[in-house]
């Protein structure tokens, strides 16, 4: 019952935030451009009547057409959302899995090798991975990869989305920073378990250190690691827009940027900024839906897999 209430609360909050988001996107964008001497001056005046007309017109179109609207290519927004959304999911899910696995393994490595020069390669490299902005690392890697491909594999086309192997570059770039973040959380959680009673008991029984670490310590750290599941998903989604743009991979992120961009020059007459309102609404709701599904999954995992400390059982 508690889980159902938690899921329902998340859904109600999602509906509220979705409504607010749609209302923000439907704000009037009527502008007036006037020539003052040799300078074009743009002014914006908000009117409640114009705002009401936008809302009424959009709701009417949704009801009549049973659709969120059409894009600039006259395709239904739902079709574009499914088309580009599938491409993004293809790189998002593997990046999530890889970042969790690599992050936990790296965190365990940092925990076990925390002295001398090994600490430099362990926690030092993890700290560096979190400290350097991911776009800077991506630029350096792109330069190295481009030089290598141009010299040894000129037939490969890693950028774009036309080849099956085009997903590998976005997946790698997308999972780098989250993996470093998870590694840091894992190491910290493992350190907090040091010298607890169940560890001393396991050592007294003669259990190997590796068994104690993987079967006992790490098991009791899951609840602390899972606390960061939602921030991890948020990091992946925010990075996905940048990664898609920098790798020429046309997914939800690049399509949303394209829909927001002002494509036409502003003339010296009254006009409306030419953004794709219906597309922006559809893709924004798509991103929010991914967040809702991730939040539900996080709540379900915490409900069923929250470990109980052995010292609390005894």
Image (tube, grey):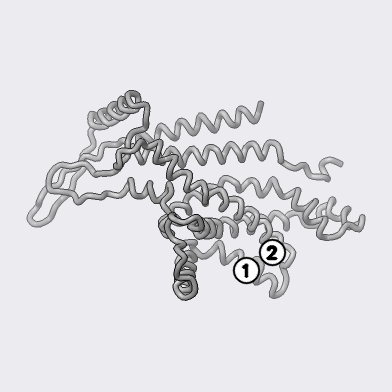
Q: State the image coordinates of residue 62 (x, y, percent, origin top left).
A: 34, 27
Residue at the extreme right: 205
Q: State the image coordinates of residue 86 (x, y, percent, origin top left).
A: 48, 44
Q: State the image coordinates of residue 46 (x, y, percent, origin top left).
A: 23, 37
The quadrant in which the C terminus is found is top right
Q: Residues within 10 Å of mark 2 (few under 14, many from 20)?
A: many
Horizontal arrangement in the rendering, residue 90 relative to residue 52 (left or right): right
Q: Against 122, is 83 above or below?
A: above
The circle drawn on residue 110 is: 2
Residue at the extreme front: 155
Residue 45, quarter of the rendered image: top left
Q: Secondary structure at mark 1?
A: helix
**Residue bearing mark 1:** 124
Horizontal arrangement in the rendering, residue 154 relative to residue 107 (left or right): left
Which residue is depicted at the point 75% across and 48% down? 220
Q: State the image coordinates of residue 219 (x, y, percent, origin top left).
A: 75, 49
Is residue 52 visible to the viewer in this orientation of the structure?
Answer: yes
Of mark 2 and mark 1, the one earlier in the sequence is: 2
Residue 298, quarter of the rendered image: top right
Front position in the image: 145 or 217: 145
């Amino acid at each position: 019952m508690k889980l159902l209430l938690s899921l329902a609360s998340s859904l109600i909050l999602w509906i509220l935030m979705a409504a607010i988001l749609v209302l923000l996107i439907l704000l009037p964008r009527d502008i007036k451009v006037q020539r003052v001497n040799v300078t074009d001056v743009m002014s914006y005046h908000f009117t409640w009547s114009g705002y009401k007309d936008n809302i009424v017109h959009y709701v009417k179109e949704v009801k009549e057409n049973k659709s969120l609207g059409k894009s600039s290519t006259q395709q239904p927004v739902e079709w574009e959302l499914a088309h580009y959304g599938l491409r993004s999911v293809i790189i998002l899910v593997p990046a999530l899995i890889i970042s969790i696995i690599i992050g936990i393994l790296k965190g365990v490595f940092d925990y076990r090798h925390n002295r001398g020069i090994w600490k430099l390669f362990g926690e030092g490299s993890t700290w560096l991975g979190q400290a350097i902005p991911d776009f800077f690392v991506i630029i350096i890697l792109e330069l190295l990869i481009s030089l290598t491909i141009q010299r040894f594999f000129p037939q490969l086309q890693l950028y774009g989305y036309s080849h099956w192997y085009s997903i590998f570059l976005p997946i790698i770039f997308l999972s780098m920073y989250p993996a470093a973040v998870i590694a840091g959380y894992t190491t910290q959680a493992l350190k907090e378990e040091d010298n607890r009673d169940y560890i001393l008991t396991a050592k007294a029984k003669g259990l190997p250190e590796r068994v104690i670490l993987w079967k006992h310590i790490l098991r009791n750290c899951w609840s602390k690691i899972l606390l960061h599941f939602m921030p991890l998903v948020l990091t992946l989604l925010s990075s996905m827009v940048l990664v898609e743009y920098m790798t020429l991979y046309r997914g939800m992120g690049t399509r949303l940027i394209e829909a927001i961009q002002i494509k036409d020059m502003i003339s010296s007459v009254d006009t409306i900024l030419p953004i794709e309102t219906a597309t922006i609404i559809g893709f924004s709701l798509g991103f929010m839906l991914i967040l809702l599904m991730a939040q539900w999954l996080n709540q379900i995992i915490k409900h069923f897999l929250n470990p109980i400390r052995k010292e609390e059982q005894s």
